[in-house]
Image: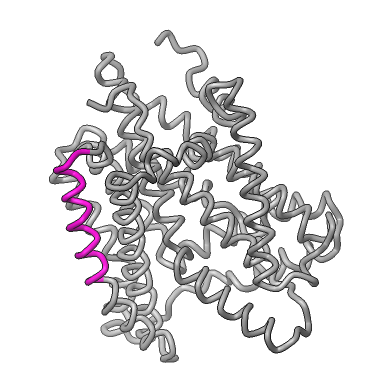
Amino acid sequence: MMSHIRIHSVDALRGFAVMAILLIHNVEHFIFPVYPVSEPDWLAALDKSVFDVTFFLFAGKAYAIFALLFGFTFYIQNHNQQKAGHDFGYRFMWRLLLLAGFACLNAAFFPGGDVLLLFTVVGGVLVIVRHWKTKNVAILAVLLLLQPVEWIYLLMLAFVPGFHIPDLHVGELYAEVGSVVKTGNFWDFIMCNIGVGQKASLFWAIDAGRFMQTAGLFLLGFILGRKQLFVLSDEHLRFWKRMLIVAFAVFLPLYFIHAQLAVVENAACKLLAIIFDMWQKLSFAFVLISAFMLLYGKTSFGHHSHLLQNYGKMSLTNYVSQSVIGALIYFPIGLYLAPYCGYTISLFIGIGVFVLQLVFTQWWLSAHRQGPLEAFWHRLTWLHSTR
C-alpha cells in the first residue's frame, strides 16, 4: 500500500516535469518575447531547431504531467486521512487557498500569470469526487478531456445564427503586461503581474482549452493513485509498456490533424485545432510518462535518479524560484539579457539554472525534510489541526 510510503518514481517524474517547465520558460524568456534583432545564419538556424525541438517535447506536456501528479498527490493525502478517520476535503480547500498565495508569489515575477492559480480554481473538482466510485470519476475525466466547451461552441456556430466565440481580449492583456515589464519599474512590474498577468493567464487558459483539460488531468492522477500504478511492479510496468504503445499510436494522427487545422483561418477550424491540440499534447504527455516509468523501472536509471527525486521533492520551491531567477536574468528589472539571448543561449542558461537548483536542493535536503516553501505550505495546511 502507498500510505505514508514515499513513491520515489513520482518524485523523479515531478522533478522531470519541473525541469522541463524551466527549460521551456527560459527558451520563451518567461513570456517576455524580446530576442536579438540579428544573428549569424548558422545561429538563427540552430535557434529555430532548439525552439522546435524544445517545444515539441515539452510545451503543454510538462504542465500536463505536473497537473496529473497534483491529482495523484491529492489521492495520497486524502487516502491517508481517510485511514485515520478524517475527511480531508475541507482541509484541502484551505490548502488550495494557500496555493493561491504561492501562485501570486510566483506570478509577481512571471508576467504570463501562473498555472498554480488555475490549479487553485479547478482543484475543487477533486473534493467533489473524493468519495465517488472510480468508474464515475473516470467517466467525468473523459468528459472533461473531450473539451466540452469547444464542442458546445462548434454546435452553436452551426445552429445559432450570428453566434460568435466570446473574445476575452487575451492579446490586449498580455500587451499591457509586456509594456509594463519593459519600463523596468519594479513595483509596477510586480503589481501588474499579480493583477493583469494573472487575469491574462486565466483567460488564456479558457481560450486554449486548459480549464477542462486541467480538471480532467487532476481526475486521471487521482485514478492512477487509486490503482497504485506508480508503484513499481511487473504488472504495472506491463501497463506502462502498453500505455506507451497506445499513446504513441494515438499521438501521431492527432498531431498531423492538428497541424492541418492550425493553418485554416475560420472559427470552426480554430475550435477544432484547440481540441486536437489538447488531445495530441495529452497523448504525448503519456508517451513521456510511460517512457519515464519504464526507464525508471527497467533500467539502472531508477537507482541513479536521487538528484531528480530530490528536485521533485522540492518542486514548489524550485518552480517559484525559477521565475525569480528568470526575471532577474531576462527582464529590465534585472540584468535585462533578453535582447542578447536567442533560443540556444537561453536553453543553456536554463540548464545552468537547473544545475544550480539541483545543488541547492541537495544542500537543503541534507539538513531538512522538505523544501522551504513545501514546509511552509505543510505547516499552514495543518494549522490548528489535532492530527
User: Farthest residue toward the top?
Assistant: 386
**What residue do we see at 31% from left, 83% from top?**
257
Q: Which residue is at the front of the view, 295 or 82?
A: 295
x and y percentages locating residue 142 in the rendered image: 22, 57
State whether residue 135 is above or below residue 57.
above
Span of residues in magenta? 233-250
x and y percentages locating residue 156 in the rendered image: 30, 78
Q: Magenta includes 241?
A: yes
Q: Main secondary structure of the magenta part?
A: helix
Q: Magenta includes 62?
A: no
x and y percentages locating residue 385 in the rendered image: 45, 12
**What residue do we see at 37% from left, 41% from top?**
302
x and y percentages locating residue 78 in the rendered image: 31, 28
- Quadrant of the snapshot with the N terminus: top left
Give the colour scheme of this rendering.
one colour
User: Farthest residue toward the front?
Assistant: 300
Q: Which residue is at the front of the view, 41 or 218?
A: 41
Q: Which residue is at the front of the view, 264 or 318?
A: 318
**Where is residue 359, by image quadrant?**
top right
**Where is residue 222, by image quadrant?**
top left
Q: How many marks?
A: 0
**What residue do we see at 73% from left, 67% from top?**
178
Judged left or right of residue 61, residue 85 is left
Judged left or right of residue 230, residue 307 is right
- Quadrant of the snapshot with the C terminus: top left
Judged left or right of residue 199, residue 223 is left
State whether residue 34 is above or below residue 116.
below
Judged left or right of residue 15, residue 213 is left
Q: Which residue is at the front of the view, 226 or 342?
A: 342
**What residue do we see at 40% from left, 52% from top?**
65
**Where is residue 337, by image quadrant?**
bottom right
